[in-house]
Image (cartoon, rainbow, N blue to C red):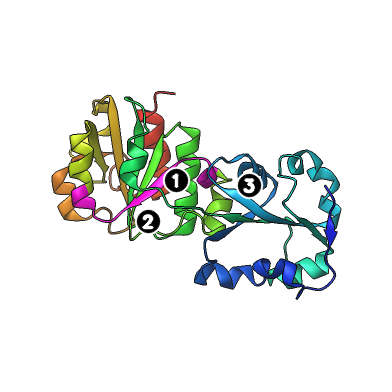
């Protein structure tokens, strides 16, 4: 590893890192930002994604030696002072570790499903637009051994910088793919032998009484509105029992409870 010193925030070699808070909103042409030591390790060990470059605060470099050994020899490692790094990023970078990753070709939902085991547990997300919730759900999915996360077209990007950070890199570890139409997707899963449970505060069955099929798809919807009524009518609905007079959990917390219950790990 031969670190490359950056003394000018406008250096074209670090142009991909400029104003990352704003540019995440506009997209990065097939790239994404990985932030922090743990997430960088996840990126460098991923078989699905590749690191394009790494930008490190100079005083963090010694503690990253083992992590950086995981990088390919052709991945440039840029080093900057705190002042320069903050000017590049557009805000104070207290973690001091950034990397640019490449998304690569998107995997279709049916192609991903074809690779899963006979006892697969998958999470299906509909309308999850909050990046904190997205990241937390992926973190829970990794913790409880979920085989894949499937997202409808209205969900936010799991590779948004904040979503990856909140997931502690799980968005780079748990396989995921998108699908265009929820109704057609339920039909496809049914044809592949999946039991399909929709989590809802008004679910017909308490989650503790729900029978676990060999293959399970657990559906989660956005907070407030929840899953669309038409989708709830198609699926078996389950609820998490709560104290009388209160029936609302954050979707990320609800996912942790439900995945812990259904996990075979």
Mark sitting on residue 137: 1
Q: Secondary structure at mark 1?
A: helix
Give the vertical position of 83 relative to 114 (above or below).
Answer: below
Q: Which residue is mark 2?
A: 128
* Region of the chain picked out in magenta, as a range: 170-184
Q: Which residue is mark 3?
A: 39
Residue 29: give x, y in percent of width and height. 52, 66
Q: Secondary structure at mark 3?
A: helix
Residue 175: give x, y in percent of width and height. 45, 41
Q: Few, some or many C-alpha atoms within 10 Å of disc 3 (few <14, some 14-19, many ≥20)?
A: many
Q: Nearer the viewer, residue 133 or 178?
A: 178
Closer to us: mark 1 or mark 3? 3
Report the number of numbered marks: 3
Real-space Cα distance between discs 1 and 2? 10 Å
Give the vertical position of 259 relative to 138 (above or below).
Answer: above
Q: Nearer the viewer, residue 132 or 15?
A: 15
Seen from this angle, which residue lies furthest front? 74
């Amino acid at each position: 590893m031969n670190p490359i010193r950056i003394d000018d925030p406008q250096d074209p070699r670090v142009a991909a890192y400029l104003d990352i808070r704003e540019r995440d909103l506009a997209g990065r042409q097939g790239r994404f930002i990985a932030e922090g030591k743990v997430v960088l390790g996840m990126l460098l060990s991923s078989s699905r994604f590749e690191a394009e470059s790494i930008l490190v605060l100079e005083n963090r470099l010694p503690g990253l030696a083992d992590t950086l050994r995981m990088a390919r020899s052709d991945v440039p490692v840029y080093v900057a002072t705190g002042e320069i790094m903050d000017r590049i990023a557009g805000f104070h970078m207290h973690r001091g570790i950034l990397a640019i990753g490449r998304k690569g070709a998107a995997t279709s939902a049916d192609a991903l499903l074809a690779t899963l085991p006979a006892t697969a547990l998958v999470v299906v997300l509909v309308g999850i637009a909050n990046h904190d919730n997205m990241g937390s759900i992926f973190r829970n999915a990794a913790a409880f051994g979920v085989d894949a996360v499937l997202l409808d077209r209205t969900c936010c990007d799991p590779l948004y910088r904040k979503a990856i950070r909140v997931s502690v890199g799980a968005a780079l570890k748990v396989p995921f793919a998108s699908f265009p139409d929820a109704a057609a997707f339920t039909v496809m899963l049914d044809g592949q032998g999946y039991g399909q449970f929709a989590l809802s505060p008004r679910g017909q069955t308490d989650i503790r009484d729900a029978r676990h099929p060999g293959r399970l798809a657990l559906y989660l919807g956005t907070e407030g509105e929840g899953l669309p009524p038409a989708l709830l009518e198609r699926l078996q609905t389950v609820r998490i029992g709560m104290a009388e007079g209160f029936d609302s959990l954050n979707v990320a917390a609800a996912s942790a409870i439900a995945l812990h219950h259904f996990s075979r790990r």
